[in-house]
Image: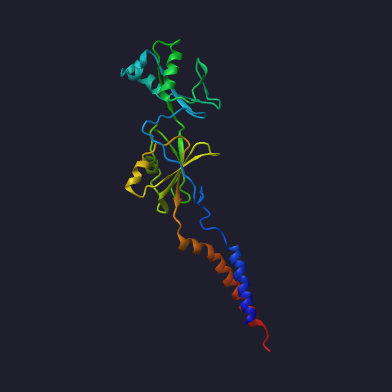
Amino acid sequence: MKITFKFTLALLIVAGISGCTVFQPNVMLRTKKNFQYDIPPDSANYQYRLAPNDYLQFRLFSNEGFKAIDISAQNQTFLATQNQGFSYLIEYDGAVKLPMLRRIPLAGITMREAELILEEKYAEFYKKPFVMLSINNRRVIMFPGSGGSAQVINLLNENTTLFEALAMAGGISSSGKAKKIKLIRGDLQNPEVYLIDLSTIDGMKQADLILQANDIIYVQPQFRIASEVLQEITPVLTLLTTALSMYAIIISLQPRE
């Protein structure tokens, strides 16, 4: 019995050491206990500013954009082609290469400011030019709270809010914490991190936060203790049961004195 007890104890110690893994190894973007979160900005008057790696959809009309609203049959084919526009990349130095203008610095200014600058530039070649710009590659990364459900969401509107993005992702998953939503923004070497609580009506004010390109939205998953513990100890119990069964068989096969 003493040998059996010592053998079992040794197995338990080895199994315990090998099974000492951190619960919820899939949890990302952890913060320290006393981490100071940033205060979400007031986005009521927010205007997006162009940045490197933005793809600009560019459309140009003359005569103050008359053809953009001309409903004559002859203009329909032209509009069908023109409405598709052409995409131009704002390069790493903040400049974009456009027809007839070569390289124009546009990074750091709003869409409206960029349109006015381009209209002024193209006035040299066209009569009363009318420029329309949009960005077709603005996106955010969404982790709604459960493994395998992350997705990249395209921001089709300049004023897409956090609440709208969550809706586009299908809402917070059943295993996600509505009171612990992290929004990570800016330079990943020194990002701004906001903690948002949507578990109450009061949190709706924070949900109205307008998203910016490349934001990361992370809904922290719930800590399911029972399932996590069971998942962790099941391999250990299986190993222990197998070892004890083999030991019992070996003991039973030994000749008795």
* Horizontal and vertical percent position of residue 241: 57, 72
> Looking at the image, how many numbered discs can be counted on the residues?
0
Q: Is residue 81 visible?
A: no
Residue positioned 61% across, 73% down in the render? 9
Q: Is residue 213 visible?
A: yes
Q: Residue most toward the left? A: 71
Quick one: 10 or 74, which is closer to the camera? Answer: 10
* Horizontal and vertical percent position of residue 129: 40, 14
Quick one: 94 or 154, which is closer to the camera? Answer: 94
Quick one: 110 or 154, which is closer to the camera? Answer: 110
The colour scheme of the drawn protein is rainbow
Residue positioned 65% across, 79% down in the render? 3
Q: Is residue 27 above or below residue 38?
A: below
Quick one: 31 or 21, which is closer to the camera? Answer: 31
Which quarter of the figure has residue 132? top left
Query: In which quadrant is the N terminus drawn?
Result: bottom right
Query: In which quadrant is the C terminus drawn?
Result: bottom right
- Left or right? Give the position of 70 relative to 120: left
Residue positioned 44% across, 55% down in the render? 222
Q: Residue most toward the bottom? A: 257
* Horizontal and vertical percent position of residue 239: 58, 68
Q: Is residue 6 above or below residue 182?
A: below
Residue positioned 37% across, 13% down in the render? 63
* Horizontal and vertical percent position of residue 224: 45, 59
Q: Is residue 183 above or below residue 4?
A: above
